[in-house]
Image: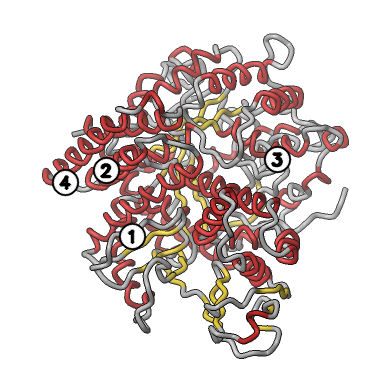
Amino acid sequence: MAAPATARPFRQFVVKIHSRCDLACDHCYVYEHADQSWRRRPRVMAPRIVRATAERIAEHARTHRLDRVTVVLHGGEPLLAGPARLAAMARELRDHLDGVAALDLRMQTNGLRLDDDFCALLVRERINTGVSLDGDRESHDRHRVRADGSGSYDDTVRAIRLLGRPVHRPAFAGLLCTVDVANDPDRVYGALTELRPPRVDFLLPHATWDHPPARPKGGTDYADWLITVYERWNAEDRPLSIRLFESVEAAARGEHGFTEALGLGSPDLLVIETDGAIEQADWLKTVAEGAPETGYHVLVDSFDEAARHPGFQARVLGLDGLSAQCRACPVVAVCGGGLYGHRYRSGSGFANPSVYCADLLKLIGHIQSAAPSVPRHTVLSSDLGALTAGGASEPDAVRRLVEAQLDLRHAMLAYLRRAGVGSEEAWQALVQLEGPALDAVLADPMVHSWAVRACSAETRGQSVPDVEFLAGLALAAAFRAGRRLDVPVRAGGRGELLLPSVGRLRWRPHDSRRDDGGIRVGTDGRDVWRMDGEEVAWEPLPRLSVGGVEMRVQADPLLPPRGTPPDPAAVWRRPLQAAWDVLSHRHPHEAAALAAGVNTLILRAGTTEPHLPRPPFGALALSRRETPQDLALTLLREWQHAKFAALRDLDEFGDTEAALRQAYAHLGVARAWHARQGPAARGQAVRWGQRALTALDAFAAGAEALPPTGLRLAAAIEAAVAQLTADR
């Protein structure tokens, strides 16, 4: 076996805020498997352990310059800790992470103790909450019972419906379902989707080779069960996100999956128990007494010290850490050997295939052969719902929308290269710079604007404008990668070259050399210059930090220059921060989604600018400095327009697109008013919702000629409005 590699930073922290539970599920890995350490732990995490945990997470994020961390409040049953302790935990984490990293705070619960006050707290403290539900009544109550043997289905569904109400839905992260092949997969799927969760996650029951899972049919029972669900999910046009299936599809495309049960990625999760002990993932409790233990503690040890434990080190080897059978498997890049704990066998430890090996092989093969052959630059129906209704699942949907937009920009560049646009030297440089640095450059909205204009001109047989933009792309990618590069640039009459996402190089506009084949511009990752030594002015792009999110600040390319305006970042910093504080408090999930999708602010100097087209996805244009509340509403409205523009880029909405765009924007305003308190706010939410429905009526006039995506978006808007008004 190869020497252990250096573990990547931990990004997910499971915090056991309460160690007991009000259910007695017979498949629970905490109480019903080999490790019984819960009996020795305090019931509730003490305040000093809470504080030390927050300090250690912030320390780790600062050391590794993490931009985002995920904390999952867990148990036992975390709701047993009570609302005061949960709120204190959330605030302690935010206080320590403020200015260090964005916090994605989550909780997994059985939901039994949820009421209106608890749900309001989850929304207020931005705790994205998943509820465990195993399907219909018979399926759920097969295992998830109380100590007296009575079922929990009715109370669980009551809690889910409460969490799904419009006023609480921003905190609803989805449902967690443990697969039992004794349950009917169609009935389970139907019961889950009937509750309209934003996401469902299916888990294979925890098992090892010493204690294998039940197989009534003696074959690939679990694959067959999941394939039945997968087929129905596809047949119904994927009405919601199912993480297991989407992760298989993503890994098969060579992307990172998003479940630790699959893939070769290094683990980035650790657990902090109620007594402050730092442990490995909880599912190791199925292996043996003490299997997750490390001997480290938050009061004494940093997470970097804990990462040296052999248990963490053994899991960073990737392919080298798998058994010979796994390494020879054709789907190993997707499966990754399955969940680490499912490989355990006495005598050989974890050097085995998963106990679900045959199931994973069959399921992955089926999904690879049956998955719709959809271009990557599309949006799934499940994400369409999240991008419309908002809530806890919207930030993840936005990140996938960002990826789709990035893929679209790659596709436009590929088209231009095939058409012979620009210099081959610039194209060769771009090919060699393919990777994260180039992706960061292509995320600049101005790239989208230029690529659309260039592709449009090429298809009409016209001259492509600003061909030197390609040289700027290559130089910007080299600058970000810290690599030396020089490329030819047509000098032109303007005397400037834009390096998207980086800055602008200026020189004398009427250069006598502009007719002799142009000039060469170079960079070394620190500076940009002309290779002939002529004097130039290098202007790095200003940046503005809003709510801990760094955004680039650009002048509006559609407005003529007006001398030397005041620094827009300095002028806008305070009003934007005040508006962001309002946004984060009243609309936490929308704020997280906006932060995931916007990287550029185009700040217009005055309030009297003529109406101008909105910028491409990734940028917001602001021209008025209002009260924080009004500016927050403006941000939400412009963000709604930006999302619609991105969706329109990926699909056609037909001749009545303007009405659909108006309905989508009105819905965003209705949701913003819905989050406020008082009769006036409620009335505004209803009025804006009605305006959205009126716009949908206009849209429906041309519905027969519309493609399916437009109709699905219209249906999602109508459903979201119905949810808002039903709660009033």
**Looking at the picture, which amino acid does disc 2 mark?**
His
Question: Mark 2 Cα within 10 Å, few/some/many (few <14, many 20+)?
Answer: many
Q: Secondary structure at mark 1?
A: loop
Cβ–Cβ under 8 Å for marks 1 and 2: no
Return the mark for residue 263. Answer: 3
Q: CA distance from mark 3 to mark 2?
A: 41 Å
Q: Secondary structure at mark 3?
A: loop
State the image coordinates of residue 71 (x, y, percent, origin top left): 50, 50
Viewer-nearest of discs 1 and 3: 1
Q: CA distance from mark 1 to mark 3?
A: 46 Å
Question: Mark 3 Cα within 10 Å, few/some/many (few <14, many 20+)?
Answer: many
Labels 1 and 3: the sequence-earlier one: 3
**Looking at the picture, which amino acid does disc 1 mark?**
Leu
Name the residue beneath numbered marker 1: 612
Name the residue beneath numbered marker 4: 681
Q: Nearer the viewer, residue 374 or 305?
A: 374
Labels 4 and 1: the sequence-earlier one: 1
Name the residue beneath numbered marker 2: 666
Left or right of 163 on screen, residue 302: right
State the image coordinates of residue 254 (x, y, percent, origin top left): 70, 43
